[in-house]
Image (spheres, grey):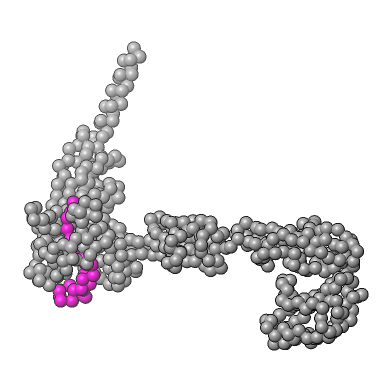
């Protein structure tokens, strides 16, 4: 009993659906005239309650996706004529038709294909194409070539070119089935011509600049392509780039059927897609800092870059360190910005962006050392280091507190005290050295007691300084502000003498007096 009820229910549902269905149109057909599509079809209602109340047509160039074409609503007869100046000469169009049955509608039936008349067989009838990546489909069956085209529009025979890298010419200079198109050069002046949407459409293309379509004498060849596949070396549809076009200027495209020695002229459907070439290699994204010997990824120095480009160094000596996007910094000098160029190529067009790399040397804090001092003596910590020393580091006392200067007054009590010197350029690892200062408890440095009578003049000075009040057992050191000793006078020959410092550059210097009891420093200024 339950099975019988279910069967009856299903039968009722199917009957109801069939009764309300809107039938699909059939027998779609049509012809074309200039700027007109003449279409007809048949329609048989599925049942008397679902007659057609109208029809909808959707059309577009060959291969368009249903739902993305142009849709128009027409009346309830089975023929219609579409008139539009947008219909292109030689264009191949597909049309779909669906019935409207009151509030419901059928599926789209079709497509059926119509080819427009070849009105663009002459250059002055050239169809205007947009440089916006639109795929246009045409059929050049029945196209002709005029005698003037044969004699005036000579294409140089430079041989067949490869994809995106055409020679300025054709493999063979012969015309047979020419049709004409035109376009306005975009702002970049760079255009990609692609015919591969109909890959078997073997053809050859030439692009001309001309201010008078009726005068072949003013035609100037801008580009020409007759191409082979770079892998198989077989003839393919045109795919090439052209650069150097004048933005806003009108250019003419001559499309010609390729002539095969066995097949004859290869005519039929072909496609044209024009697009502006806009390349953006990327943007500079800041200086890349690398420690000598390390490897840096150059892509870290640019942003918004597409893949597929190549890197090269502006300086040939650097190129040996470039491996794809990596730069090996070993052996390269310090302190300069190396420019590394990333380049994107597309046929004749390219764009570049630079990454900047600065290479830093290892930091050098010098070799550990030791100094002896009297209590409360002021010492130059750099005098305890040996070897090569970077002077831009920081000194730290035994409590790990940073010191403002390398000139420090040691403890008033005897004993050993450690000072650390740390150098870092914030790129390479930091380097550290240590100075042990031994303070002799048996001696005390006192400026008032031992150096009160010492005078220095003039200050500021221009060429030399005069010192007076010196004891015979003293040592005099002239140092720069980093503590580097420039000259030393041991056991002055008299209590008064002159030191020639004309070779020094203008600036501040330190004069240090040292004897067995301690040391004292004075600052002097050299000015021209």
Image point (15%, 76%), residue name: 217
Position of residue 163 measured from the top left corner of the image (x, y, whole percent): 25, 58
| Residue 15 occupies quadrant | top left
Write the start and end of the magenta stretch as one range: 197-224
Q: Nearest the camera: 341 or 394?
A: 394
Position of residue 166 measured from the top left corner of the image (x, y, whole percent): 24, 62
Q: Nearest the camera: 389 or 311?
A: 389
Q: Report the side of 310 relative to 474 (left or right).
A: left
Q: Report the side of 395 relative to 303 (left or right).
A: right
Image point (19%, 60%), residue name: 160
* The magenta stretch spans residue 218: yes
Vertical placement of 240 versus 57: above or below? Answer: below
Number of marks drawn: 0
Q: Nearest the camera: 238 or 311?
A: 311
Q: Nearest the camera: 495 or 420?
A: 495
| Residue 229 occupies quadrant | bottom left
Position of residue 478 measured from the top left corner of the image (x, y, whole percent): 75, 77
**Quarter of the image containing the N terminus?**
top left
């Amino acid at each position: 009993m339950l099975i019988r009820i279910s069967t009856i229910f299903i039968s009722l549902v199917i009957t109801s659906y069939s009764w309300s269905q809107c039938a699909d149109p059939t027998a779609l057909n049509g012809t074309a005239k200039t700027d007109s599509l003449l279409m007809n079809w048949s329609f048989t209602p599925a049942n008397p309650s679902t007659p057609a109340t109208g029809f909808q047509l959707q059309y577009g160039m060959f291969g368009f996706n249903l739902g993305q074409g142009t849709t128009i609503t027409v009346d309830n007869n089975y023929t219609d004529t579409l008139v539009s100046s947008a219909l292109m000469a030689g264009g191949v169009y597909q049309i779909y038709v669906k019935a409207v049955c009151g509030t419901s509608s059928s599926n789209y039936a079709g497509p059926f294909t119509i080819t427009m008349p070849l009105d663009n067989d002459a250059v002055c009838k050239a169809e205007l194409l947009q440089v916006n990546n639109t795929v246009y489909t045409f059929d050049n069956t029945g196209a002709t070539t005029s005698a003037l085209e044969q004699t005036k529009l000579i294409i140089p025979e430079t041989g067949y070119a490869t994809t995106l890298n055409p020679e300025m010419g054709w493999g063979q200079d012969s015309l047979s089935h020419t049709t004409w198109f035109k376009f306005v050069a975009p702002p970049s002046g760079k255009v990609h011509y692609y015919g591969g949407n109909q890959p078997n459409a073997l053809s050859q293309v030439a692009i001309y600049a001309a201010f008078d379509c009726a005068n072949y004498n003013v035609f100037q060849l801008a580009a020409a392509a007759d191409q082979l596949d770079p892998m198989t070396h077989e003839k393919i549809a045109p795919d090439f780039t052209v650069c150097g076009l004048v933005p806003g200027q009108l250019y003419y495209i001559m499309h010609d059927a390729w002539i095969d020695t066995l097949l004859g002229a290869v005519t039929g459907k072909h496609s044209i897609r024009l697009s502006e070439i806009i390349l953006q290699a990327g943007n500079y994204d800041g200086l890349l800092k690398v420690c000598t010997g390390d490897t840096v990824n150059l892509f870290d120095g640019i942003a918004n870059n597409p893949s597929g480009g190549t890197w090269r160094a502006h300086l040939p000596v650097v190129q040996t360190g470039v491996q794809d996007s990596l730069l090996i910094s070993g052996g390269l000098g310090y302190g300069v910005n190396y420019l590394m160029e990333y380049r994107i190529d597309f046929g004749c067009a390219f764009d570049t962006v630079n990454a900047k790399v600065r290479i830093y040397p290892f930091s050098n804090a010098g070799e550990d050392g030791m100094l002896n001092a009297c209590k409360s003596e002021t010492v130059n910590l750099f005098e305890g280091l040996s070897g090569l020393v970077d002077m831009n580091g920081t000194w730290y006392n035994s409590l790990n507190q940073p010191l403002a200067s390398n000139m420090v007054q040691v403890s008033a009590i005897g004993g050993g005290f450690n000072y650390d010197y740390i150098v870092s350029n914030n790129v390479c690892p930091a380097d550290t050295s240590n100075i042990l200062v031994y303070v002799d408890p048996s001696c005390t440095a006192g400026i008032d007691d031992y150096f009160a009578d010492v005078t220095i003049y003039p200050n500021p000075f221009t060429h030399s300084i005069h010192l007076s009040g010196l004891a015979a057992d003293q040592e005099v050191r002239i140092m720069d502000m980093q503590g580097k000793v420039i000259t030393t006078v041991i056991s002055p020959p008299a209590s008064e003498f002159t030191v020639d410092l004309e070779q020094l550059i203008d600036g501040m210097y330190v004069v240090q007096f040292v004897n067995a009891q301690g040391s004292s420093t004075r600052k002097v200024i050299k000015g021209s």
